Image: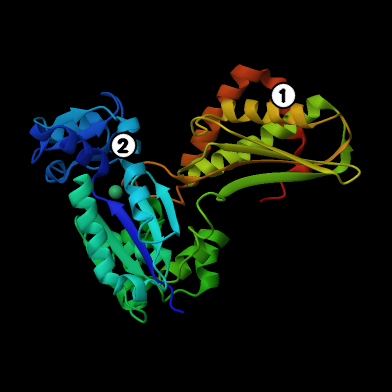
Amino acid sequence: MQNVWLHLDLDAFYASVEQLDNPEYRGRPVIVGQGKRGVVSACSYEARRFGVRSAMPVAQAEKLCPDGIFLPVRMQRYQEISRAIMLHLYDFTPELQQISVDEAFLNLSGTERLLGPVEASARRIKTQVRDQFGLCCSVGIAETKFLAKLASDYKKPDGLYRVLPGEEQPFVDTLELSDLFGVGKRTVQLLEGLGVHSPLQLRKFRPEELRGYFGPSTGEYLYQVARGIDPGIYSGGAEDRSISHETTFETDLRDSQALRSVLLELCQAVFFRVAKLELSGAVIFIKLRTNDFLTRSARHTLSRPVVSLDLFYHECLRLVEKAWDGSPLRLVGVGIGGLHSIGEDRQLDLFSDKSDKSARVDAAVAELHKRYGTEELVRARLVKPRRPSGG
Ligand SMILES: [Mg+2]
């Protein structure tokens, strides 16, 4: 059976909710962002005409659009509307994967007999979202989630586009490199440096060449997306999406101080990987395996997503202290689950360059020095042979 995925993306979501709740803002440039020194979280299409974009400093947006309506983020309200819409979408399929507050994948495979042609379902979804919730959305349809996501972006706002089976590569060829989800600014710059300005030119590179230039994972990613192949970012259910690291010790670990160091290092690895992928999640879990091969795991769901390494580390420590009876340990693992993309209209840059990441790591290390003193950090450095084995 042919797979049919529909990706739904609410247009300028935060700003549209503000216009919905405040009719006097309709038709006017609305910019939602936190504080004068913050960045723009979302802006209405009227504001985009002035050159305002998401993730731009609010101060810059004020210069571009001095008469704009600047509003704080009201996340609770957005989540409330989001929940109502997502619940409604279950009328179309039991298989729905929400990936952010304003985006979801719907598996419509095999629904044609019941619901009619997929395009008709898509139009019905759009009409219902507009009539019942007063909001506009764009939808994309394709055989894979990745292409459905690109397709929803294709005719935004109020878009509807289907990539027909067999049309994947021609569709990708109509896109700019920066339209390819997951290919961020820096990757585009690096590609342009290599004389690559389009997906078509990108396809001229052999996979080993791309891996050589960009490293194994980015190289492989670029090779696939240039061909319209789904790189699998959204495979698996939304609930069970998680990122974890674990490490196995050459000699059993018995000392709680050493355990704390290992935990800290694992937490850092997980936290920065989650941050780099611009994901967030509220489920924290740990895994311990003792020298008699008994595995203990524990999880805890926070009321809010994990926003700081400090919080993550302390939650893990708490779970470990509860689960560990002091038996010598063979393995320790930590992870964050329930992951989804953060922010609206912010492009996921999977490949932000090293300096960016190391700046963040440095800031975090400085913070850790303050909090834990140098000794534990040095200790974490000394456990190098027990580096996380991945996960
Ligand atoms: Mg959106």
Identify residue type, mark 1: Glu
Q: Is residue 347 left or right of residue 273?
A: left
Residue drawn at point x = 14 percent, y = 41 percent: 47
Q: Which mark is residue 376?
A: 1
Residue 48 place in picture, x, y as percent: 16, 45
Name the foreground residue: 177 vs 313: 313
**Kind of residue at badge 2:** Tyr
| Closer to viewer: mark 1 or mark 2 | 2
Q: In the image, 281: left or right of 10? A: right
Q: Earlier in the sequence, mark 1 or mark 2?
A: 2
Helix, strand or loop at disc 1?
Answer: helix
Q: Does residue 177 appear in this view?
A: no
* Residue at image point 33% right, 47% down: 102
Q: Which residue is mark 2?
A: 78
Q: Quadrant of residue 106?
A: bottom left
Q: How has the structure been colored for display?
A: rainbow
The answer to whether any part of residue 279 appears in the image is yes
Q: Secondary structure at mark 2?
A: helix
The vertical placement of 257 against 211, above or below, is above
Q: Residue furthest right?
A: 292
Q: Where residue 27 sits in the image (x, y, percent)?
A: 8, 41
Q: Position of residue 52 (x, y in %)?
A: 19, 41
Total numbered badges shown on the rendered structure: 2
